[in-house]
Amino acid sequence: MIFTSELWWWGEANGAVAAVGASSDEYRVFWDDELGRAGERVLLSPDGSRVALTDQVIDLDDGRSRRLPRMSGVATIGPAAWSPQGDQLAVLGSTRADVVQPDSAEEYRVTRAVLGLVNLTSGSLSTIADVEPRSVVDGFTVAFAPDGRRLAYQSGNAVVVADVDGTEHSRFTVPDDTRLAGKGAWTPDGRGLTLVTQSRCCAGEAYPSRWRLHVVDPVTGQDQPAPVIPEQANLTALRLMGWSPQGEAVVARHHPEPAERVVGFEAGIGMTDSVRVSRVDVTALRPGAQPRVLIATPVDDVQALDVASGLIANGAIRRGQPPTGLGPNTKILICVVTLALLAATTLVVVMVRRLVQRHVVRTRPGATAR
């Protein structure tokens, strides 16, 4: 899995992304210059061997970076979803800028978005469609079908199902408070497409926002008859990452900072901003059962995460052991403080010696005081 937070290391993480192995507690840290959030604009490949981020793909085995092809007319190209086989990467070419809102406040938003597909074997890039920029919410825009030959994407209030060559199969509309549920939106059999809907309700709750997953027909958009997945309350966001072998919906639950104002998809890429999210956990949801927490995280240390979809599908679970001892940045801080103390001590010693020497000169018989 990979995870990020903007609150590491004395208040600023500077784009750091941490990765931990599936079979052992081996940690690694790399950097994203665009400050992307794990699971949204920093995406782990299905087998967990690579990470896609703005303009590049990094191999976690050897650390080598591969640049993504350029897309004309946009500033950057960022990952939107991996194909199940890991050979293709859906990308969003986008331009982002501060936009003045009706209340004169500035908000960082996507001003242009183009959906494309990168063939990671040949390195070629093909364009699929322009996407309504105001509807782009990282992590909720594109999902590949299990066979890797189709994908679903959202543009405005339209959900579109198309072949990877861009040939459109179906299109249906959804309400403003509804989006594709995440990279795991397709059901394992490829016959259903999962949407997530936010409702703002329940006066008296600390964060009156509830989230519901529902499976629809990918052709008509009509709800399919299926057991109801438990609704989740008091969350900033709920993102579907995949399905367990037991048929559970494995989700990332974004928990809000205390006293934060409730927002939804209208906030765009700022919906899960670090000022709104205190922590994220990974939980399995099943009809008629209590949520089963798979990965718990401490407040502020994990504000966004992604888990390899292959790991979710095979259901492998082990007990994780957080790293102990001093981290590299703490060691650096200790070294800096130690050197500063040594320098200060040396300065004090020199000053004391000079004062003693002056005192000796003043008190020596026949000496002239200065």
Image (cartoon, rainbow, N blue to C red):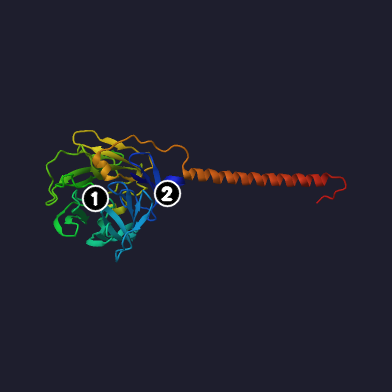
Where 21 sits versus 58, above or below?
Answer: above
Residue with the mark numbered 1: 85
Q: Quadrant of residue 149?
A: bottom left
Where 164 sits versus 254, above or below?
Answer: below
Residue with the mark numbered 2: 13
Q: Quadrant of residue 77?
A: bottom left
Q: Secondary structure at mark 2?
A: loop
Q: Which mark is residue 169?
A: none
Identity, as a three-letter code, of the amino acid under mark 2:
Ala
Please provide percent x and percent y for residue 67.
34, 59
Most distant residue in the bottom direction: 73
Identity, as a three-letter code, of the amino acid under mark 1:
Gln
Within 10 angstroms of label 1, few (less than 14), some, or many (20 or more) residues? some
Query: Is 66 situated left or right of 211 in this image?
Result: right
Is any atom of residue 106 visible in this view?
A: no
Please provide percent x and percent y for residue 257.
35, 43
Within 10 angstroms of label 2, few (less than 14), some, or many (20 or more) residues? some
Query: Is 263 situated left or right of 193 in this image?
Result: right
- Label whose residue precedes the other's in the sequence (1 or 2): 2
Instruction: Please identify the quadrant where the N terminus is shown.
Output: top left
Please provide percent x and percent y for residue 64.
38, 54
Is any atom of residue 126 visible in this view?
A: yes
Q: Secondary structure at mark 1?
A: loop
Please provide percent x and percent y for residue 206.
31, 39
Please tell me which residue is depicted at 38% across the width and 51% down the height of the picture. Answer: 63
Please tell me which residue is depicted at 67% across the width and 45% down the height of the picture. Answer: 348
